[in-house]
């Protein structure tokens, strides 16, 4: 069968296996091609959200290969080793989206946008996959919608206590049937920053075909490949991010299922996301935005090896610049510490080989579930950020650099006088 041209198709294409088993992967996770090429090898790394307790510091620790490759047929970027989801998303998984103020504001705005962009009538059913503590669904609820969450970790309990009806389960066809039986089809299903995370993509897509109403939509956001490359975000490569999507690769994916991508845009979250609206069924006319973004991707070189080779070379240089600066400051006697412990900082610090001898601690906000734990691999302790105000270190590395402006503003308001170091998109000192 000849390769169809990129673009929305009217028929559902015959698909390769989209449900992956843990272990090394030799084929493109979307189109099944073996035409893969290395983007960046980050060595063997621990799971970034498996934070350690003090007692774990005396035990062996598991490291997995962490390599990004790209598919020369559909441009998907993917890691080439999959860790079992039950191990990655263990019951003690520390992430809670409500904790960052920026995220709450962002999610509320996203709910508003979706309701207005797609003219969703009030009291429609909205389901969120990987709904976490229910932050996005609260936004929809305040827009007058009926909501249901699907969350695999025990953060589901927090959402339920907060009045957001949440099923404690991974999303799949069974859960889709269960929701349809109990609540009917969903007018909108959302997935924010989880759509690149699931190894059982085929089961998820088939679950969406079941759950989304015939006149409904699937709306999702994920890291955008273009923003990862442009802003040098090699720190977004970790075992949770199985795939980094271009629009080319997403169009390819949706060819295999009963959906049509009708709109795509770049949005600001996490240093650059892509937001996609897919309508149920084929034979929809996409907005111009879809073709425009495809044209942009080709113009940027995203379909060429050169694009990824440049990214690799710049990433290695950036890592070296970062380490050199820290070592120079340390040797000159300055105190340097870390601020925040987002998942991505595990990739950066493990790749750069930066441990507690260089950054004695990572300061987190007092409400963080990560306090008292240790960064995997490098074993840097995570402490209450009150310590920054007390100690006034000479330099503070902004590991959640994608939120730099608001973090600097908050810490300055609390009286922090330190200089800041940005590790990305270039190594930079901010006075
Ligand atoms: Zn592919």
Image (cartoon, rainbow, N blue to C red):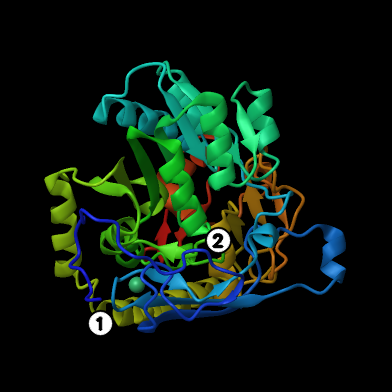
Q: Are marks 1 and 2 in contact (CB under 8 Å)?
A: no
Residue 280 in the image: x percent, y percent?
Answer: 31, 41
The structure residue drawn at horizontal position 46% and vertical position 75%, both measured from the top left corner, is: 319
Which of these two is toward me, 314 or 90? 90
Please tell me whether mark 1 or mark 2 is closer to you in this view. Answer: 2
Dividing the picture into quarters, in which one does residue 361 lie?
bottom right
Q: Is residue 380 left or right of residue 100?
A: right
In the image, 221 versus 188, the foreground residue is: 188
Q: Nearer the viewer, residue 199 or 284?
A: 284
The residue labelled by disc 2 is 240
Q: In the rendered view, would you say 96 is above or below 304?
A: above
Q: Which residue is mark 1?
A: 306
Residue 154 visible, this angle: yes
Could you say whether the residue bearing mark 1 is in a helix, strand or loop?
A: helix
Q: Quadrant of ligand 1?
A: bottom left
Residue 104 seen in the current view: no
x and y percent of residue 330 in the render?
60, 72
Tell me which label, 1 or 2, sits earlier in the chain.
Answer: 2
Residue found 55% across the figure and 32% down from its top: 179
Q: Is residue 428 above or below residue 357?
A: above
Q: Is residue 246 above or below residue 37?
A: above
Mark 1 Cα shell of 10 Å, populated few (<14), some (14-19), many (≥20): few
Q: In the rendered view, does 304 fall on the left or right side of 32? A: left
Decide: few, some or many residues near mark 2? Use Cα within 10 Å; few <14, some 14-19, many ≥20. Answer: many
């Amino acid at each position: 069968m000849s390769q169809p041209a990129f673009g929305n198709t009217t028929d559902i294409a015959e698909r390769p296996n989209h449900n992956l088993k843990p272990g090394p992967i030799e084929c493109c996770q979307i189109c099944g091609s073996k035409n893969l090429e290395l983007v960046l090898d980050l060595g063997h790394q621990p799971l970034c959200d498996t934070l350690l307790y003090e007692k774990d510091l005396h035990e062996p620790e598991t490291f997995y290969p962490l390599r990004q490759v790209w598919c020369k047929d559909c441009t998907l970027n993917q890691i080439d080793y999959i860790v079992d989801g039950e191990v990655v998303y263990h019951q003690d998984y520390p992430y809670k989206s409500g904790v960052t103020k920026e995220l709450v504001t962002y999610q509320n705005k996203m709910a508003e946008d979706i309701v207005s962009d797609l003219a969703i009538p009030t009291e429609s059913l909205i389901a969120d996959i990987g709904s976490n503590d229910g932050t996005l669904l609260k936004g929809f609820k305040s827009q007058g919608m009926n909501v249901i969450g699907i969350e695999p970790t025990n953060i589901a309990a927090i959402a339920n206590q907060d009045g957001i009806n949440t099923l404690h389960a991974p999303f799949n066809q069974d859960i889709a049937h269960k929701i349809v039986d109990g609540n009917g089809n969903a007018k909108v299903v959302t997935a924010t920053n989880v759509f690149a995370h699931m190894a059982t993509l085929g089961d998820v897509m088939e679950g969406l075909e079941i759950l989304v109403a015939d006149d409904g939509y699937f709306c999702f956001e994920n890291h955008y490949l273009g923003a990862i490359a442009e802003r040098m975000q090699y720190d977004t490569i970790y075992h949770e991010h199985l795939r980094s999507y271009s629009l080319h690769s997403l169009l390819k994916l949706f060819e295999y299922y009963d959906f049509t991508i009708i709109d795509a845009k770049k949005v600001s979250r996490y240093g650059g996301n892509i937001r996609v609206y897919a309508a149920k069924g084929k034979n929809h006319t996409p907005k111009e935005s879809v073709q425009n973004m495809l044209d942009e991707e080709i113009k940027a070189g995203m379909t060429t090896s050169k694009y990824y080779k440049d990214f690799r070379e710049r990433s290695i240089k950036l890592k070296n610049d970062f380490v050199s600066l820290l070592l120079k400051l340390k040797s000159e006697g300055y105190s340097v510490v870390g601020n925040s412990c987002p998942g991505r900082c595990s990739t950066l610090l493990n790749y750069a080989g930066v441990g507690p001898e260089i950054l004695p601690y990572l300061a987190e906000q007092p409400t963080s579930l990560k306090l008292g734990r240790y960064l995997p691999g490098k074993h840097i302790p995570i402490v209450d950020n009150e310590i920054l105000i007390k100690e006034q270190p000479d330099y503070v590395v902004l590991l959640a650099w994608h939120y730099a402006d608001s973090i600097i503003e908050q810490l300055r308001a609390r009286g922090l006088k330190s200089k800041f170091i940005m590790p990305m998109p270039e190594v930079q000192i901010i006075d």
